[in-house]
Amino acid sequence: MMPEASTAEMSAPAPDHVSRVDQVGVEERVARFRTRSIKKSSKVHALKLVLSQIDLTTLEGQDTPGKVRQLCQKAKHLHDTLPDIPHVAAVCVYPMMVGVAKKALTDSGIHIASVATAFPSGMATTEAKLEEIKLAVEEGADEIDMVISRGKFLQGEYQAVFDEIALCKEACGDAHLKVILETGELGTLDRVRHASDLAMHAGADFIKTSTGKIQPAATMPVTLVMLQAIRDYYYKTDRMVGMKPAGGISKAKLAIQYLVMLRETLGEAWMTPEWFRFGASSLANDVLMQLKKQETGVYQSGDYFSKD
Amino acid sequence: MSDGKNAIKLNYDTGWEYAAAPESTDHININDRYELFIDGKFTAPKSGAYFDTINPANEKTLASVAQASKADVNRAVKAARGAYDNVWSKMKAAERGKYIYRIARIIQERAREFAVIESMDGGKPIREARDVDIPLAAAHFFYYAGWADKLDYAFPQKTPKPLGVAGQIIPWNFPLLMAAWKIAPALACGNTVVLKPAETTPLTALKLAEVIQAADLPPGVVNIITGDGSTGAAIVDHDDIDKVAFTGSTDVGRIIQRALAGTDKKYTLELGGKAANIIFEDAPIDQAVEGIVNAIFFNQGHVCCAGSRLLVQESVAKEVITKLKERMQTLVVGDPLDKNTDIGAINSAAQLERINDYLALGQKEGAEMYQAGGKTPKKGYWCQPTLFTDVAQSHRVVREEIFGPVLAIQTFRTLDEAVSKANNTQYGLSGGVWTDKGAKIFKVGQNIRAGVIWANTFNKFDPTSPFGGYKESGVGREGGLHGLSAYVNLH
């Protein structure tokens, strides 16, 4: 028996009540975001914002406490010789590593995000997923990144997916819930839109594109559709939901194009780490390299930036 | 929009501004003075008169341009006739094709220069000149070059013959592109040409004359003469013109049609429009909003096929209008040469006055007016993108072509009502339909009397596709296979 969900909304939006998406139109709009001119002070502003929105991530089978501690060090000290740069928003690790990260990040202001719910496949019972969330929260996770059951979603069992998200939200307690749609497995932008609506109605604090383990991971068209879903949900409920594209954003230039898209779709209120994140492992160093270039006028070799 | 509120909630006024990115003009060569291009050479006008062409974004004079008199038109037509009789009509079709290909290639090579000049002379955003006007102009030459030696296949079991000398008069909204639409099919079919660009935007046509020289086209095949309405009238009235092709206002189209009555000159007229863009409740709304923006604000609304009437189904009207207003806040209005600019300058002082008259009229008629606000430069001619809501078929801002960034928004309840409103106009050039249902697209498309209907998109152009109007939007088709038949006699 499934435990009962206890959110304000009890049912999943049916696909025929979900807004339609035209892929060609989405791609045309995205192309326009990519041609805005961002340079000099405008670029520095954007680069610093990108840094502050990064969820620095390690999600490997080979992760060890040592690796996680090194990553946490990097999160706190991105590049100490550059003045006035922010720290990243969060470090994202498996539940088993939350305790290690918690210790390493004490008093840093950096959040600990943990993937749970049988990441990345989500192939486990609901009970097992809830257990995993509780463990991560008990260990000190501030944010939980869950995956939806794509198999159930593609089978048309929307209510089951909805209920599971609602239960996960409940299990999170005070921790924020990010819901990973794994858009690379959904097939169409219409389904991305549907899954976004479903996740938000079930209580998601953030919606997130991908695990990073499936290609394609985050893309600009997918992210635009999710941002538009967030906007419509906000109109409807007055509740802001955050957005996290994850996977495949490793260059500063691309990250800035995402910010242009964010700026022109949701505007000022979302332009903070509280409402927008990049899930990335190697983006930070490219951003740092660009910031250094703005300061000195030359590009430094990758060896001048710490890699952990 | 659960609460029915129409207020804008999202704030697009962020602390993060884009960086100015003006396209350089260092590589641009604009002469102080341009003569008439007749018989392969630039020659001074018999009249001795010149007029200035200015940059509408800063009111600075760009160049002084010759005013062609009747005597100059005579010279141009004589040169065209000579080239037709002695060279062009006798040349092997494949050879004609080669020349047209050469023009296309040179335009491509000089695309950047053409884009910058088009933007400076006409006020359109560099993004549009660069991505739309110039590539499409080259594409038209490429497309019709391919037909030159295949006309027998275009008209099976007929013998297509050229008409002779074509007199062509083009507007100021897409200067080079309209020149390409006119010249390319005429040449491909074996005709010679006298072309007059618009008074406010002659520069890219004169640059095209340089391209034609560089392509080594036989003298007199293409003659480009500048001037005002009197020059156009002299072309239309000339006895030795076999065909008139005109793109411009319906008023001038009427004058031309009257002048041609009783003559055996062939003609095509591409005139005004007041296109309906129909948004059904099952449309992809976010993309439709983008489509509305593209339909009416493209080229400051100086587009004959602009979607200047929005018909939106009542059940989604609030959502569409709110999103449209929000989208308008992110449109960048300003320096046309800046790559960030979405909306450039109004083409001329006269056109701005005409638009402003309509803005005043709409408000006097009781329509609700909305503008996104924002600053515009002090110098130059500017108009913020504008919406009129609470309007009906009987409002003049719904009935008349404004030719500016001004959209009239009406609602409808059923498909039949939408079609009937869309057709209730003197025009019939284009239209748009937005729905997720394929069957609805066909039903609306078949019932709207307009030359072009776009489905889930707007303002898309391709040389292979015919373009033209019903009713007062014009006579004949340009583009595609249809565009060839306007330049041949069939036996």
Image: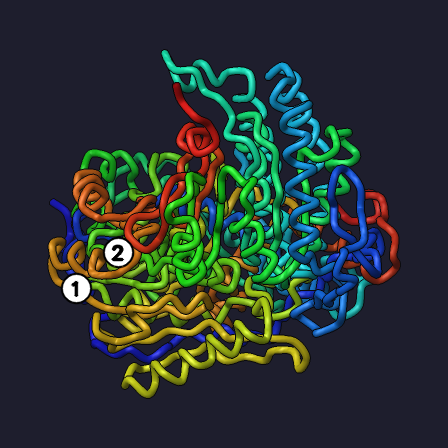
Percent across and percent down for residue B456 are 32, 46
On the rendered structure, is B375 left or right of B9? right
On the rendered structure, is A294 left or right of B425? right
Separation of marks 1 and 2 at Cα, in angstroms: 9 Å
**Please, is residue A79 above or below residue B409 in the view?**
above
Label 1, secondary structure: give it: strand
The image quadrant where one finds the C terminus of chain B is top left
Labels 1 and 2 touching (C-beta < 8 A): yes
**Please, is residue B162 above or below residue B325 in the view?**
above
Residue found at the far top of this picture:
B157
Query: Badge 1: few (under 14), some or many (20 or more) residues near its Cα, within 10 Å?
Result: some
The residue at 59%/80% (across/down) is B375
Percent across and percent down for residue A132 are 36, 47
- By what rule are the colours in the image chosen? rainbow
Q: Amino acid at mark 1?
A: Phe
Label 2, secondary structure: give it: strand
Please name the residue that numbered disc 1 is placed on. B412
Q: Return the residue nearer the eye: B54 or B233.
A: B233
Please name the residue that numbered disc 2 is placed on. B278
Residue found at the far bottom of this picture:
B364
Percent across and percent down for residue A285 are 72, 49
Q: Amino acid at mark 2?
A: Ile
From this viewpoint, is residue B224 visible?
yes
Residue under mark 2: which chain is it in? B
Q: Within the image, what quadrant is residue A66 found in?
A: top right
Q: Return the residue nearer the eye: B282 or B459.
A: B459
The image's mark for residue B322 is: none
- Label 1 and label 2 in one chain: yes
